[in-house]
Amino acid sequence: MKKNKGFTMVELLAVIILIGVLSAVAVTSMSKLTEKAKQSSYDDFEKTLEEAATNYFITYAEEIPSMGNQVTISAQTLIQKGLLETMNDPADDSKNCDQNSYVVVRQEASPNGYNMNLIYEPCLVCSHYQSNSCK
């Protein structure tokens, strides 16, 4: 008798289905990872805005808001003063995160009454994202 070597149709179909399932799992997990990376970039941009505003007030102390008041500093101002670089939107790599972004800074009473207590609320506005602190 002659031995047939090779795979049966059922075996080939099983392998194709297995590859399909593994591909679907890989694509799903990759899309979740890219979304996490984008969100992490937005969070980093918000922290960078806050740090740039802090550095702004180190240089321009006369513009610190008085007790109970607030000051809004645009990202464009921070870029012009050399305290911030342009921010590319991670979703589409366009340079539009700095056009409408700003930081609201207000001064509140400190717990001990001696130190200045500045509250920073960065508002990051990109084409596919907007901070929760934006009003």
Image: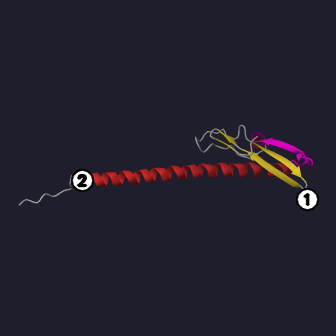
Q: Residue furthest right?
A: 113
- Binning the other alpha carbons within 10 Å of mark 2 as few (below 14), some (14 to 19) or many (20 upward) gives few
The quadrant of the rendering that contains the N terminus is bottom left
In the drawing, what numbered circle is on residue 57? none
User: Along the line of sight, which residue is nearer the eye, 88 or 29?
Assistant: 29
Q: Residue furthest left?
A: 1
Bounds of the magenta segment: 58-77
Q: Secondary structure at mark 2?
A: helix
Q: Residue furthest front?
A: 10
- Binning the other alpha carbons within 10 Å of mark 1 as few (below 14), some (14 to 19) or many (20 upward) gives few
Q: Secondary structure at mark 1?
A: loop
Residue at 13 percent of width and 57 percent of height: 4
Which residue position holds label 2?
A: 10
**Residue 106 location in percent, x, y?**
86, 48
User: Which of the two discs, 2 and 1, sits closer to the camera?
Assistant: 2
Residue at 89 percent of width and 49 percent of height: 61
Which residue position holds label 1?
A: 115
**Residue 25 location in percent, x, y?**
44, 53
| 10 on left or right of 114 | left
